[in-house]
């Protein structure tokens, strides 16, 4: 049976998807209602801020675009090497002390998750072949799908921090509570950093999700024959 935390993560992601459907030009499916959260679960939902950073690349061939991404791609903080795209998430939290009969406990929990996507941006030159543009757009779409997986790890980390701290036991002193919070949150962040690494290994950095450029079939980039 799913735990409250698992239900919370699932409901939160569904809520985000529902919001995307609301602002999308495509009509939302019928009979879809936004999930409702009670007072307890609402306090465990972090604020989410999503940012996009782009690095420019140029070129008129797939080989030139690949070379530019290898040279100027985003540096991974976890693996210290360049990739075509990178997702950085940062979890912040705050809480107050509440002295009760049982001891010092956490109160007034708040959290925030900042997600930053770094992606390549190609300013398409005039007369670029339509096959190259199509291949590039397909690659960007697959790349975003892969990066969204890293975003989910960051969102789960934020929820996990708030959920865990909300169930922190009472301590005889608030200094002990603070030490426990520091240790616990450090372990949670480390766990989800490792989840990012495992995700990249499992997907081969997006290869299994179609994030490959140039595409596996060079014929897809065949230049059109000039008209006589």
Image (spheres, rainbow, N blue to C red):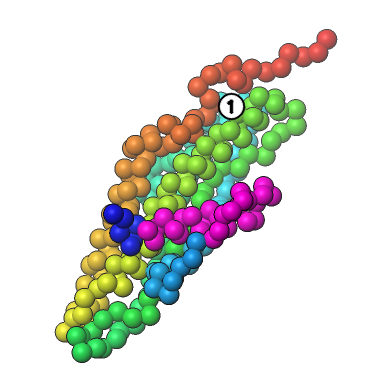
Name the magenta segment's main secondary structure: helix
Q: Mark 1 points at which residue?
A: 62
In this orientation, which residue lies closer to the viewer: 45 or 183?
Answer: 45
Look at the picture and state if 135 lies above or below 80.
above
Task: Please report the residue visible at 35 percent of the width from the left and 42 percent of the height from the top.
Answer: 199
Q: Start and end of the magenta stretch?
A: 7-34
Q: How many labels does the image show?
A: 1
In the image, is residue 205 part of the stretch drawn in magenta?
no
Judged from this view, the residue extending furthest toward the front is: 31
Q: Where is residue 65 in the image (x, y as percent from the top left)?
A: 57, 32
- Residue ranking furthest to the left: 172
Residue 135 at what x, y percent from top left?
A: 60, 28
Seen in the picture, residue 121 relative to 38 is either above or below; the reply is above
- Asked if the magenta segment contains residue 8, the reply would be yes
Q: Which residue occupies 33% across, 62% down? A: 4
With 39 as the anchor, is 101 left or right in this view?
Answer: left
Image coords of residue 112 (percent x, y): 44, 67
Residue 151 visible: yes
Residue furthest toward the right? 228
């Amino acid at each position: 049976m799913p735990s409250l935390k698992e239900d919370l993560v699932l409901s939160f992601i569904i809520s985000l998807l529902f919001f995307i459907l609301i602002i999308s030009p495509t009509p939302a499916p019928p009979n879809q209602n936004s999930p409702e959260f009670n007072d307890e679960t609402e306090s465990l939902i972090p604020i989410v801020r999503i940012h996009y950073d782009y690095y420019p690349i140029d070129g008129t061939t797939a080989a030139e675009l690949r070379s530019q991404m290898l040279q100027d791609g985003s540096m991974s903080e976890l693996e210290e090497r360049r990739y075509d795209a990178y997702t950085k998430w940062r979890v912040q939290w705050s809480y107050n002390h509440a002295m009760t009969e049982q001891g010092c406990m956490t109160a007034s929990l708040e959290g925030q998750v900042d997600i930053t996507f770094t992606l390549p941006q190609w300013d398409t030159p005039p007369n670029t072949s339509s096959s190259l543009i199509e291949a590039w757009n397909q690659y960007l779409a697959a790349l975003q799908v892969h990066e969204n997986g890293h975003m989910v790890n960051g969102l789960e980390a934020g929820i996990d921090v708030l959920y865990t701290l909300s169930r922190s036991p009472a301590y005889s002193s608030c200094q002990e509570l603070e030490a426990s919070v520091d240790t616990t949150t450090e372990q949670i962040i480390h766990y989800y950093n490792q989840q990012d690494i495992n995700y990249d290994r499992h997907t081969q950095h997006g290869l299994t999700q179609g994030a490959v450029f140039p595409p596996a079939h060079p014929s897809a980039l065949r230049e059109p024959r000039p008209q006589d």
